[in-house]
Image: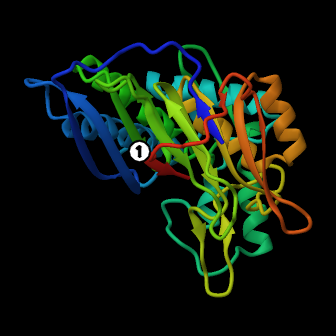
Amino acid sequence: MVLIDPAVPERLAAPGARLVQASGETMGTCWRLRCWAEPGHPDPAGVVAGACDEAIALFSPWDAGSAISGFNHAGRGWYLLPPALWRLLQDSLQVARLSGGALDPALGRLADLWGFGPSGPVRRPPSRAALEAARACSGLKHLRLGQGGRAWQPGGLWLDFGGIAKGWAVDLVSRRLTEAGLGVHMIEIGGEIAARGLSPQGRPWWIELEAPPGSDLPRALVALHRGAIAGSGSWRRRARPAGQGWSHAIDPATGRPVEGAVLSVHVLHPRADLADAWASALMVLPPEDGLARAKAAGLAAILTLQEAAGRITRRSTGLSDWLDTAEDAPRPEVAEA
């Protein structure tokens, strides 16, 4: 399957530009960058690092000094949220509404309980009592928003933007690179990707969608030049206690990790943060419900499913403008989950 970005390209790298590559670690994962740069442009690695540091200062529950940690550990009362955190919360709430509650940015205590929070990995599933206690103080039902960017902390409510923050950081890096004159680039942070512009030869950025380990699915390639793609997979970021294991995707309805038919989700969107949020939400929903909600929201999405007979298949929606019938697929620039 070959998907071609149907948007009109915005930029073409100059004939004298050179391909620069860089990589590093941030937000508990890795980042990778490729960009076409001309002499005199700033070091792109520094641009990436600066933007990622901003994301950590806002959204990292592992950083005791972050804005989200300040809210999560605050006492009962109203608190003024930083503008960026407030805007991302509003975007999360929009996806929560459109997905029927499949995305919930107020499940921080449950994510932590299952080993995906600042308390670190766990050796066994939580007890029923611990699970019910975490559920009792988690979820959007406890979140109240006021005027001027204020949020009510009832005491014990933990926000968690793990399903959207990497996408937000990708968008920020992409904007900063463009502002620095590096408008033809591809940036990936932990599987969330933004790509802009064409190479001096007029080529887009080719991205291969990662398939579940051991599956025999045909390759799926995306030619991206003006948007973002986010992926989420059940085999990625798992808790792995001895003899057990579970996904990082938490079902807001049960407070438990999802282990359903959806093995992975890829969402194509102009914004990486919304692609990231929708990929997280579609991992939780049953396949038919997820595809229906994605279609209603006008999304381009691909779901990889485990059928009842054990066969692994792909289902998609919103891709009619993306599909290309080319038989000879080029070498991909990067693989992503």
Of helix, strand and loop, which one carries label 1? loop
The residue at 39%/51% (across/down) is: 27
In-image side of 291 versus 43 (left or right)? right
**Residue 47 in the image, given as x and y percentages of width and height:** 23, 33
Given residues 232 and 2, the one toward you in this image is 2
Residue sitting farthest toward the left? 40
In-image side of 51 versus 7 (left or right)? left
Q: Which residue is mark 1?
A: 333
**Residue 51 in the image, given as x and y percentages of width and height:** 31, 34
The residue at 14%/28% (across/down) is: 42
Residue sitting farthest toward the bottom? 243
Q: Establish if 261 lies above or below 88.
A: below
Please say whether residue 152 is visible from this viewpoint.
no
Q: Amino acid at mark 1?
A: Glu
Given residues 14 and 65, the one toward you in this image is 14
Q: Establish if 72 lies above or below 261.
A: above
Dot 1, how many residues are within 10 Å of its Cα: few (below 14), some (14-19), or many (20+)?
A: some
- Quadrant assignment for the N terminus: top right
The residue at 40%/25% (across/down) is: 196
Given residues 36 and 75, the one toward you in this image is 36
